[in-house]
Image (cartoon, coloured by chain):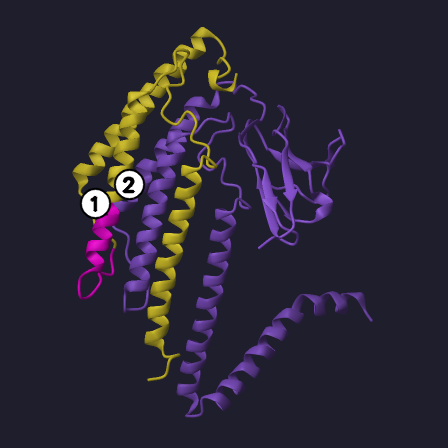
Chain colours: A purple, B yellow
Amino acid sequence: MNPKNSSFEKKFLPYFLFFGIGVAGYFAANWIFPGGTGATMQNLAVAVGWGGALLVGLIGLAVVYRMFNGTINLTQLISEPSGEASISRFQLLVFTFVIAISFILLTVSNQRPGFPEIPATVLALLGISAGSYIVSKGIQKDITIAQIPPTISVSPDSITAVPGQSVTFTASATGTGTLTYRWQRIGRGQQVAVDIPGQQQQSLRLTADFAYDGSEFQCKVSADSGEATSAPVKLHVQEDRG
Amino acid sequence: MLWWQLSNLQQFVKIEVVILVIALLLSVAYRLATGSINTKGLLKAKTETGGISPARVQLLMLTGSVGLYYLLLVLQSLKTQNPPSKLPELPPELLFVLGGSHTLYLSSKAVSRARNKSAGPLEKPTFFQ
């Protein structure tokens, strides 16, 4: 096969597939909702709308769940690289959030199709907010930011569980630069902490097993400016007496 | 009436958006309350003496008030029979007040930075020591 043709096929294959799925969907809708082309198209559009709404809902819930349990790291949402919270970033976040929420609420509440108009005063509000943030960053740009090593801000707690139960240890840290998380295990009666492979997030998830009973877990946070380790916490695994 | 009709889809999307927005707000509020979102030094003056900065406090209060006021304006406009196709207007006076508040904050920051600069490099913040 000519390599040029192969690359062409690879490039356009997804479009052909989508087209094929679209045509198949049209005929399927025609079969499910008999009653003419116009009605079929309308039903197809509503079916696609339901699919989209369910998909967006599921993605939204997954994002919120991951934010809630700490998998999505929000520690530095309003912090500067120095580790201190920034009021200018906070106010920009608040106004952007308020306007975005208002825009979405008005869009879904309106019976007419289309997006709501944004008045000049609201644009001015966003302008003041964003302008203030930029000027604030400009003022501190020429100041040398102190390199602040990571500090553990949220430490994990010891857990008692029954075999098979899912357990989660969570830690959080602040400091300059990009923070890298690493979880370590100190086996029962041992002194050396060993890295747990593949566990490089703020939360460590395990399924309780007698093999873990009495083990200690700690989170090591590293950055260019240094590193910090949380105090070791124990996992107790006991028989389910209930 | 068939359950998959357009009017039901619109109703579903409205409920879905409201649930997601509330869940998002609760999630951020929970992480703020538990300290997972770092708020250290949010109101602290970035000077050698430290302490609470009045310029930051007034900016925080005004930000919260204006944000809440605008959300109430939007919720009020949604209560009407036909929701408007335009976001509610903000009173120009409020924009002037907000502009003044930001100017005050930025001026105070510029002055304190200039003082710090003339005094030498920034000290390591005490709460990390």
For the residue pair B52 and B93, the one nearer the viewer reads as B52
- The secondary structure type at the circle numbered 1 is loop
- Image position, residue A58 (x, y; %): 49, 62
- The secondary structure type at the circle numbered 2 is helix
Q: Residue at coordinates 29% horizontally, 63% vertically from top-left?
A: A109
For the residue pair A195 and B57, the one nearer the viewer reads as A195
* Most distant residue in the right direction: A1
Q: Mark 1 lies on which chain?
A: B
Callout 1, which amino acid? Leu
Q: Is residue A204 above or below residue A164?
A: above
**Residue B78's image quarter?**
bottom left
Q: Residue at coordinates 40% horizontally, 87% vertically from top-left?
A: A39
Residue B90 is tagged as 1
**Co-location on one chain, circles 2 and 1:** no
Q: In this view, does A100 lie above or below A181?
A: below
Q: What range is drawn magenta here? A: B70-86
- Image position, residue A242 (x, y; %): 57, 55
* Most distant residue in the bottom direction: A35
Examine the rendering and report whether any part of residue A115 can be seen.
no
Residue A125 is tagged as 2
Say if the magenta span includes residue B117: no
- Image position, residue B18 (x, y; %): 34, 58
Q: In this view, does A29 lie above or below A66?
A: below
Callout 2, which amino acid? Leu
